[in-house]
Amino acid sequence: MVKPTRVTNRIRALRFAHDEMTQAELAERLGVTRQTVIAIEQGRYSPSLETAFQIARVFKVPLDEVFQYPDPQEGTK
């Protein structure tokens, strides 16, 4: 069984904010399969750094507006 990544993302929200872009449309622009976009969106797969930057570029936002990595120290305060 694949362990989910702790990296979270806002891809679904960004797709809908950009004329309700489909997963297939995003996949085509990235040169990946729709299944890859689904897995990234659901947090089952972390994209390569290059793909992460490509996703941010498609939506014209900084990388940290697409992907977040929780700080383990925040949960202990």
Image (tube, rainbow, N blue to C red):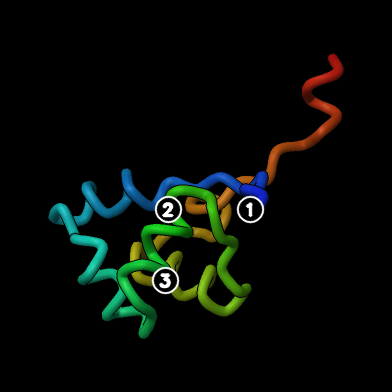
Looking at the image, residue 33 sits to the left or right of residue 62; the answer is: left
Work out whether mark 1 precedes mark 2 in sequence or the reverse, and give the earlier one: 1
Distance from label 1 to label 2 (Cα)?
18 Å
Residue positioned 55% across, 52% down in the render: 67
Amino acid marked by disc 3: Arg
Residue 36: give x, y in percent of width and height: 42, 69
Q: Secondary structure at mark 2?
A: helix
- Depth check, mark 3 against mark 1: the one in front is 1
**Circle 3 residue:** 57
Looking at the image, residue 39 sits to the left or right of residue 21; the answer is: right
Distance from label 2 to label 3 (Cα)?
16 Å
Amino acid marked by disc 1: Met
Q: Secondary structure at mark 1?
A: loop
Which disc number belongs to residue 41?
2
Which disc number belongs to residue 69?
none
Please rate how many residues cluster around mark 2, counting C-alpha atoms within 10 Å: few if below 14, some from 14 to 19, many from 20.
some
Residue positioned 45% across, 65% down in the render: 56
Please rate how many residues cluster around mark 3, counting C-alpha atoms within 10 Å: few if below 14, some from 14 to 19, many from 20.
some
Q: Is residue 62 above or below residue 48?
A: above
Residue 47: give x, y in percent of width and height: 56, 68
Work out whether mark 3 precedes mark 1 in sequence or the reverse, and give the earlier one: 1
Please rate how many residues cluster around mark 1, counting C-alpha atoms within 10 Å: few if below 14, some from 14 to 19, many from 20.
few
Which residue, as the protein is rendered here, is positioned at the far left?
19
Residue 15: give x, y in percent of width and height: 27, 54
Work out whether mark 2 precedes mark 3 in sequence or the reverse, and give the earlier one: 2
**Circle 1 residue:** 1
